[in-house]
Amino acid sequence: MGKRAAATLVASLTITCLSASTAAAETRLGDTQILSASVNGGKNLVVGTAAQASFSATVTASDPEGIDYIDAWLYRGSSTAPTGALAAAGTPECTALGATTTRCTFGFVMGEGWLQNADAGTWRLHVNATALDGDHHRTSAASVNVQRASKPTANAAPEPVTKGKPITITGTLSRVSWSDSTYHGYANQPVRLQFRTPSGTYSTVKTVTAGSAGHLKTTVTATRDGYWRYSYTGDTTTAASNAPGDYLDVR
């Protein structure tokens, strides 16, 4: 473990902007190396209307003289003109992996109440690894997509239905607004209509585009009993999600 704990940055989402020198492009002095870094285990971070989302980032760095400390923080926007920043919560947990290498885990807390909808998208992890001899490696070492939670619904009707007759599957695709903690319709998005038998797995039947208020509607032919659902694959700012399957009895 390094001689001192990573410095705590005082920062907040959206309001705080990093200076260009704080989150500048990669700089290196000597033979310090950031070997690996990840945020939230490499998975997207989905934030709904919960009070907060806790996650971690892990950084491993090495230097022949040993690592003194590792700092890490998240920022949004470009490296030369970031538009927001988030500091790690508390002191990182650091472990020496031999005489030359140190691994640190940083805890972060991102609250729905702090976020604006514009904060959805890619956040990058800026890392400063400094060695005992003063060498350093500073770079944006990993990233995470911070996404607004989504929620599709599905209803298949009429039920029961005669085999060979048309059925209509209606629903809505919505996503959370961090401004008011409420789900609103998400328009003009491709959503997959999927079907499975009682003992099978879901497969895609067709793709439907959500209407102006996120409304979904399409018609298919009834062939056998099973579950119908809408499935949204997500995008950079909005998480993937599946509607609960709606069972339809075909007679």
Image: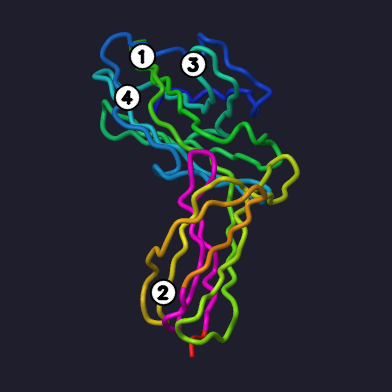
Judged by depth in the image, the label closer to the viewer, 2 or 1, is 2
Q: Nearer the viewer, residue 243 or 179?
A: 243
Q: Does dot 2 land on a helix, a strand or a loop?
A: strand
Judged by depth in the image, the label closer to the viewer, 2 or 4, is 2
Q: Nearer the viewer, residue 189 or 41?
A: 189
Q: Where in the figure is residue 226, as x and y percent of width and height?
A: 45, 80
Pointers 1 and 3 in contact (C-beta within 8 Å): no
Q: Residue at x 63, y 23 (%)?
A: 10
Name the residue tied to disc 3: 23
Gap between marks 1 and 4 measured at Cα: 9 Å
Q: Is residue 88 left or right of residue 13?
A: left
Judged by depth in the image, the label closer to the viewer, 1 or 3, is 3
Kind of residue sitting beneath label 2: Arg
Q: State which tag comes first along the sequence, 2 or 4.
A: 4
Q: How packed is label 4: few (under 14 Cα within 10 Å), some, or many (20 or more)?
A: many
Q: Where in the figure is residue 44, as x and y percent of width and height?
A: 46, 44
Q: Which of the 4 image quarters holds residue 151?
A: bottom right
In this figure, which colouring scheme has been used for the structure? rainbow
Gap between marks 3 and 2 measured at Cα: 49 Å
Q: Residue furthest bottom?
A: 251
Gap between marks 1 and 3 measured at Cα: 14 Å
In the rendered image of this protein, does residue 143 appear above or below residue 53?
Answer: above
Name the residue tied to disc 2: 196
Kind of residue sitting beneath label 3: Ala
Q: Residue at x 62, y 31 (%)?
A: 118
Q: Residue at x 37, y 14 (%)?
A: 26
Q: Does dot 1 land on a helix, a strand or a loop?
A: strand
Kind of residue sitting beneath label 4: Ile
Magenta segment: does it hold 235?
yes
Q: How packed is label 3: few (under 14 Cα within 10 Å), some, or many (20 or more)?
A: many
Residue range of the region highlighted in magenta in the rendering: 221-248
